[in-house]
Every structure is written in C-alpha cells, then in structure tokens.
Amino acid sequence: MLRTPTPTYDANAQSGSKDLGNLPEWDLSDLYASDDAAELKRDLDWLEDACKSFAADYEGKLASLSAEEFLNAIHRHEKIENIAGRIMSYAGLRYYQLTTDAQRAKFLSDHQEKITNYTTPLVFFTLELNRIEDATIDTLFDANADLARYKPAIRRIRAMKPYQLSDEMEKFLHDLGVVGDAWERLFDETIAGLEFEVDGEPLNIEGTLNLLTEQDRSKREAAARELAAVFAENIKIFARVHNTQAKEKEIMDRWRGMPTAQTGRHLSNDVEPEVVEALRNAVVAAYPKLSHRYYELKRKWLGLDTMQVWDRNAPLPMETTRTVGWDEATETVMSAYNAFDPRMSEIAKPFFTDGWIDAAVKPGKAPGAFAHPTVTTVHPYVMLNYLGKPRDVMTLAHELGHGVHQVLAAEQGEMLASTPLTLAETASVFGEMLTFRRMLDNAKDDAEKKVLLAGKVEDMINTVVRQIAFYDFECKLHAARRGGELTPDDINALWMSVQAESLGPAFEFMEGYETFWAYIPHFVHSPFYVYAYAFGDGLVNALYAVYEENPEGFQDKYFDMLKAGGSKHHKDLLAPFGLDASDPKFWDKGLDMISGFIDELEAMEG
C-alpha cells in the first residue's frame, strides 16, 4: 500500500518562533484512514461481538479449563485488547492534536463510552482468574510452556486479589470509569484553552512556559507573573478537578481496602512500597548535596543575591542563545543512538520518515510531550511541542527512547509488552544520557562543556528532585483530601510546603507561585506516576556506570532488557547487569552521578 505523504508544518507560521525547518506531523492512517473509515466501523462491530462471545464461552468456566483452553482464552482476550486499543489510540491521538475541537472531543468521548460498554462483559475474566487456587494455576503453567510465558502478567493481575470487590460492584466501577475520564478531559481542554499575553504577544501555555528559559530575565519574570495571573483566574476549576479526582480515588481505595493512596500505583508498577520509600528517602536526604548546592552555584553565575522561581530554568550567562533547527536536532539524537548501536538508530529512523512524530507547536494542541505505544501490531507515536531550545533536543532523545523501547517490546504481545512505569522511563532517560554524552564529547572548549554539564544537572534535578517533591505533594494532597474538601488555598499551601525544601535557600518565591501545581497533568491523569521518573533516572545512572566500566556485551544485554517489556520483574531485568533496585544503596549510586557532575562544575569555578 502506498503511504500518503506526511504533511509538515513550518513552525514560523504556527508559533511565531524562528524557522525550525519542516516539522513532521502525525500520519495516523496506520491506525485508521479517517474518522469515518469503513475499517473503523468494522472493528467496532467485531469488538462488540467478540466481547459478547468471549463472555458466553468463558464466564463461570475459567477454573475448569485445560491449559490449552486457557491459553486460547488469553489469545482471544489479547485480540480484543488489540482492537480496543487501536480504536482508542486513534481517537485519543486525533484529539491531542487539537483538543479545542468539539468534534474531536465528541469522537473521543463517544468511542470511550462504546468501548466501555462493549468490554463490560469481560470484567468477569480477572475476577474469576483471581478466585482460582494457586495450586490450580501452577498446574496449568506446568502443563503448557506457551501458557507459562504469561505467568508474569497473571501474577500482576492476581496481586489485586486482596482488593477485589464483588462481580457486580466491579462491573459498576468499570462503567463508572467514563465519568473520571470526563474530569480528565475538562482539565485537558481547560489547559489547552488558556490564553496568555506577554509583552503584547498572545501565547498558549507551551509558549509561555518556554519563556521561562529565555536569556532575558525581564521576559522570564513577565512570563512567570502571567502564568500566575491566568492560573489564579482559573484556580477554582483546577481545585474542583483535583478535589473530585482525589475523592473518587479515596472512595475506590476505601472500598477495595487499600492501605494507602499509593498502593494501587505500586501494584501497577510491580514495585514494592519499601523500594519506592527507599528511593524517596534517598533523594530527600540528598537535596542539600544536589539541588541546594547546584542552585547556589547558579545563583552566583547569574550574579543574584537571591534567585526567583523564574530563574530556575534560566540559561547560564555564558550560554549563547541559539535555536536548534529540526534537522540538527534529528542528526544529534540519531548520531548518538547510532554510536551506541546501529540497531538503535535503525529502529528510530521511521519515526522521522513515516509520520510517527508530531513536532510543531500549534493552537489547541495538547501541551508537553509523550510517546504513545498504541498497540503491538502498529507502532508508537511521539508527540512534541518543539521550539528549538537545546532542552527540546533532550526531550526528543527522551521520547524517542520510549518509542524504541515500545517497538522492541511489541513482540511480547498485548498482555506482556506493556512495561511498568518505573521501567518504562529506563530507555527514555538512557536515550537522553547517550545524547548528552555525545554532545559533551563534541564540546569545543571548557565553556561549552560547562554549559552542557550544567544543563544536564538541571535536567537531572528536574527528573529526580522535582519529581520526588511532586510525589510528596501528591501524598500530602490525597491524605488531606481524606479529611474533607480542599480549598484552592489549602492546595496552594501543600504545594509550597514541598517547594522550599526541595529547591533550597537560594530561592525566593513570588506571590502567585503557589498556584503552579495547577498545570501538572500527571496529578490528574495518573496519580503518583511522578516517582517513576526518579526511579528511571536512578536506574539509568547505575546502568550507565556499568556500561562505562564494562562496555563489552552491554548492548546485547540492554536490547534484551527492552525486548522483555513487562515480561520480567525489575529484579530479573537488572540481574544481568549486577544491579538490584531493592538494595537501599542502589539509589545512592545514581545520586552520586549527579553529585559528581556538580563536583565537576565546582572544580571549574576553582
């Protein structure tokens, strides 16, 4: 089949920034040709019938199936997951391209409701699976090696066994899921629709946040104050969304008997609470030698008595303000990937050539960046809001790492390809590290090396320190919500309680900064997601140290880890590298790498 040429956007026309070259746009035709494609209707009809027939064939009978029959049931369930995932991927990606378009929002909502209704008869599957005796399950695995391959996925499903409700209640909660989705869409549409004006220029949230990295300090301050003003105007909506989402979670957790608000996330991440607690404690203990120490250095570089929040991501005074065109960004990342292993750049190539990346900043487009795996029979899609900043190059390296990981894991099939969030960040942060090391090796002098090192330290602080502070904020938010409705001022106070601790004494906080929790999408879409970033960064730092110490054969082990997807526990994945995340000292290795970079920067001062 001939591929339709991918349309490109000139960012100059879209965002008013310098010409960045031809920025790619998604070609979603690998999912469906259009919103009224015959294949889409065909798949919806198939899905409705497949769910009904699956329930008719297996409901009430799982415990009596032979190993071969059970394997067949899993294969049928995976096919249903695949088709449902394909439909929702198309609807969701199309929506994220233009969240302010009512037709796209309706299309997404209608298909969410249809798929929720169609798949409700399947709720019995995990409920019955969890009622089967351990000995029976083990006997089935022993009888069929192909079935035994699914042991990790079934183990994760059965981890929910203690928190399972009645069949009727589980079906009710499944149906109710679309209500929570509606609150998420309200958040997305509100954020995407916010209008800002800085020095007479109208901007969306991405463009305004981008100004916080401008060399001109007055421009950064103007952007920060405008963000605060617009957030304040909309703070009641954001507080309502957070209150509702946190209350819904509290009700769910209470009914399920989950001991903490974080338990569900730890289960889905397949990580032990004590491992997360060890990570959190190690990072908080390291605040003084990481963020506090670095920002004190930065304060001196900027020539300030005290830093304001709009200085946190400021470029260094010795840093030349330059725009990185799309072609240069592509070459930088691809050459770094290729230098590590040509297989990596080969996997990444079609993202650039076949419409798998949507890069330009456009009105109504969702903010931020992500890599969406879609389904294992298609391919991932990467979304960026590319503005030509050096940090945007690192974002490209990050999301492309996710994409490579998702391509490699796809061979595991729907049930085993999906990687827990803690491990999903591994390939993305590793991709950043490869790109950073490549740029550092090519630095022409000490001044350029200093700028690169400082930029990497800032990125690591944002990935580790900032995300653990976010995690602490969420823990406090959910605990406080259990005591009753939270006013915007209540939430503001919780936010500020973690900011000073994590950023350190170099900072003052402008009036209005207390509302900056409002725009963080993870708090709404996936509570407690954020610690996965710190987990991934610490894990990659330890991995990279292994690579530097003993590069022989590392690439093959690394590819094997990515190919495993969600088929192995973090302990088994890291064992070939001689690493163990359950060892409390493990996290210190990763934090020591960041501290070592700060040591280098301090030595340059001398």
Image (cartoon, rainbow, N blue to C red):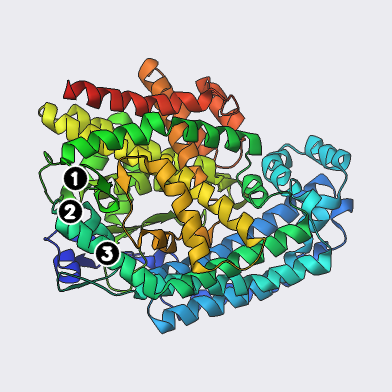
Looking at numbered disc 3 in the image, what kind of residue is underneath it? Arg
Give amino acid for label 1: Pro
Tell me the number on the disc at residue 225. Answer: 3
Residue pictured at 79% horizontal, 62% vertical: 124
Percent position (x, y) of residue 263?
A: 67, 48
* Residue 214: mark in rendering: 2
The disc placed on residue 315 is 1
Q: Secondary structure at mark 3?
A: helix
333 is higher (above) or lower (below) than 260: above
Q: CA distance from mark 3 to mark 2?
A: 14 Å
- Tell me what residue is drawn at x 48 percent, y 35 percent: 284
3 or 1: tag closer to the N-terminus: 3
Question: Gap in Å between the C-alphas at discs 3 and 1?
Answer: 19 Å
Whether tag 1 and tag 2 are in contact, CB under 8 A, the answer is: yes
Q: Amino acid at mark 2?
A: Glu
Residue 22: quarter of image: bottom left
